[in-house]
Image (spheres, rainbow, N blue to C red):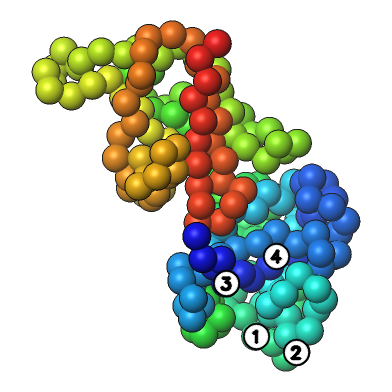
Amino acid sequence: MEELPKLYVVGSFLGSSGYGSDWNAPDAVPLAASAEGETDFEGFVYMNVETPQFKLLPTNEGFDGDYGDTGEENGSYSGTIEQEDEVNSGTPEGTGGYFLVKADTDALTYELTQTDWAIIGNGTPKGWEDTDMTYDADNKVWTITLDLSAGVDPDETEKNLRFKFRANDAWDLNLGAGEEDNSLSFGGGDIDVPETGNYTITLDLSNPRMYTYSLTKN
């Protein structure tokens, strides 16, 4: 697959979040554009500090050409960025968390959405209610172990029991089956449960725009 253009998030959160050293460009977290020549970068970033501050870098080799917030003081979150006279960007509520980060270096805008992920579906014990996953900072994945049921949904005789992933107890951000095995896409299809049993499920959002899951029977 062709390498997608990248933008990098560097800041005060890197050390506490398992990425490396704070404000160290080589340890910055990548965002990816949708295709060559596009400027619509996105990715997920864990900011495990109380009041994160960060900038966006065109490369992970240094701070030349960095982008920061257009606000008046460090930690501002205006939703707009600039490359001159900028300040360190912050988060919407000034708090840490696991964020979907989007930035457009042509429109000079950025957006952070805090997310907590869950599994949901009629193949899970709670059905179409969320079962929360836990973030594993060492491995940079969300994980859960639970019983899954296979077979045919008794209320929909042509559909198998299934599940998918969603954030924040809402359908605004949900991930389902992508085009490749174990790949995920926003709004993708439900994932069939292969056979009844106890499983460990991981959700890996660490590779921008190449989101995946694993399903391991215990």
Of pointers 2 and 3, the one earlier in the residue sequence: 3
Give the residue type that dot 1 points to: Glu
Name the amino acid type tagged 2. Answer: Asp
Q: CA distance from mark 3 to mark 1?
A: 19 Å
Label of residue 85 in the image: 2
For image coordinates 51% across by 30% down, the residue present is 214
- Graded by Cα atoms within 10 Å as few (under 14), some (14 to 19) or many (20 or more), the crowding at tag 2 reads few
The quarter of the picture where residue 184 lies is top left
Q: Residue at x 27, y 20 (%)?
A: 161
Q: Which secondary structure lies at badge 3?
A: loop
- Amino acid carrying label 4: it is Val
Q: Is 114 on the left-hand or right-hand side of 55?
A: left
* Residue drawn at 35 percent across, 21 percent down: 193
Give the residue at mark 4.
Answer: 9
**Disc 4, SS:** strand
**In the image, residue 76 lies at what x, y percent?**
68, 71
Q: Is residue 90 above or below residue 83?
A: above
Disc number for residue 62? none
